[in-house]
Image (tube, rainbow, N blue to C red):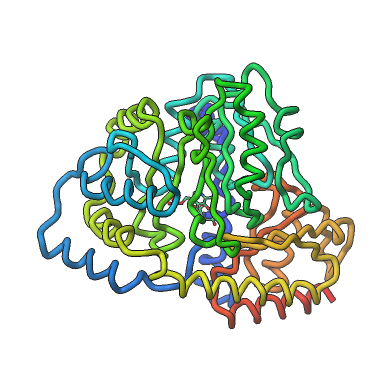
Amino acid sequence: MNPKLSDRINAMATSATLAMAAKARELRNEGIDIIGLSLGEPDFNVPEFVKEAAINAINENYHSYTPVDGYADLKEAIIKKFKRDNGLSYQPDQIVVSTGAKQSIANLAMVLLNEGDEVLLPAPYWVSYSDISMVSGGIPVVIPTTIETDFKITPESLEAAITPKTKLIIYSSPCNPSGSVYSKAELRSLADVLVKYPNIIVISDEIYEHINFTEDHASMAEFDDMYERTAVVNGVSKAYSMTGWRIGYIGAPNWIARACNKMQGQSTSGANCIAQRATITALENPPSKIQYMVDAFKERRTLVLDLLSEIPGMKTNSPQGAFYVFPDVSYYFGKTIDGMTINNATDFSLFLLEKAQVATVTGVAFGSPNCIRLSYAASNADIKEALKRIKKVLS
Ligand code: PMP
Ligand code: GLU
């Protein structure tokens, strides 16, 4: 902490996912054979048809600043995607394209939160929601869940967390890190609570929409009585394996989208021109074109769950989407193994890094201190080797 820095940045935690990935990279550079299961980053190449679109865009001399909220034809492609995949209708002034879904969420927090506003975060939540909320003046209010309810909140736990200061609720479905997927009926039961509190806005993070093994994706925005106060976040990082291309977007009520446009115009301007052109092609093609990646993730989920079940004290739910497993490892708390005492999930994650050379992320970063997260967006060989090593150091 440096007193010359702002209180704002001093209060902010470093992103635990990115920090662990950086640490793994550093150790690898030192020649240590680390298997990275820390970062939620598909290991596939960008699909050829998307790459071609980007190459064409370069050859067509796309180079200038882009409209702040995205190219008009990209916004049209996003509108069609929302209609095709989600049955949602938007006008162009309700869409904002950003430099990744992370920026979309940061924009939303900045334009919606005043100092002291409370932000409901069903835990486990994605790492950045809490710090993005705090740097925007909000106060995270965690709604804990348990593995027994598949890490999902209930109408009762939601209502119990609401106060006159509640301004936002942010969640992802499919969920990073638990893989839980809210069904339409479950979302409706939560909406029945939210309609009683008209000041609360919903940020529905649907970036794992296509990586859903239930084949049944539902959005809070589908309900007529929630559409006017739900901002849907999505992007191409996960489904199209385009994490480094940095394109995310929102569909939201016009007043929210226009505020995000204003915010972005004073911070980063429009997103990268080549990546935007490629995203048009990605979204215009049917999701069946990326099904091979979803199928592979589904197989890997079975592989990870099978291998984890052979290790004592690894209690898991059955993730229905995304590419993470989030075992409860509290069985190991208080134990000393190979000279290292494990008192919490952070110790456990560091133990795995040091003794098994496997990078994971502590559940503390996701608001669930009994768990660790393993990403299975890795090759079958890496998954097998990583779980073999973990089993060995714990036996
Ligand atoms: N939301 C969730 C739930 C995520 O896991 C991620 C991971 N990157 C993001 C948002 C941000 O995605 P992007 O790469 O588009 O910024
Ligand atoms: N969303 C990914 C993860 O949770 C990428 C890392 C990040 O953006 O924080 O691992």
Q: Nearer the viewer, residue 37 or 199?
A: 199
In the depicted structure, whether residue 71 falls above or below residue 304: above
In the depicted structure, whether residue 259 falls above or below residue 348: above
Q: How many marks?
A: 0
Q: Nearer the viewer, residue 8 or 237?
A: 237
Quadrant where the N terminus is found in the figure = top right
For residue 356, side relative to residue 204 (left or right): right
Residue 364 horizontal/vertical position (percent): 70, 48
Residue 188 horizontal/vertical position (percent): 62, 39
Quadrant where the C terminus is found in the figure = bottom right
Mark yes or no: residue 75 visible. yes
In the depicted structure, whether residue 33 falls above or below residue 260: below
In the depicted structure, whether residue 270 falls above or below residue 108: below
What residue is drawn where x is 62% and y is 53%? 181
What residue is drawn where x is 27% and y is 45%? 75
Image quadrant assignment for residue 284: bottom left
Q: Nearer the viewer, residue 250 or 43?
A: 250
Residue 179 horizontal/vertical position (percent): 63, 57
Q: Residue furthest top?
A: 164
Image quadrant assignment for residue 121: top right
Residue 281 horizontal/vertical position (percent): 27, 61
Mark yes or no: residue 38 visible. no
What residue is drawn where x is 85% and y is 70%? 312
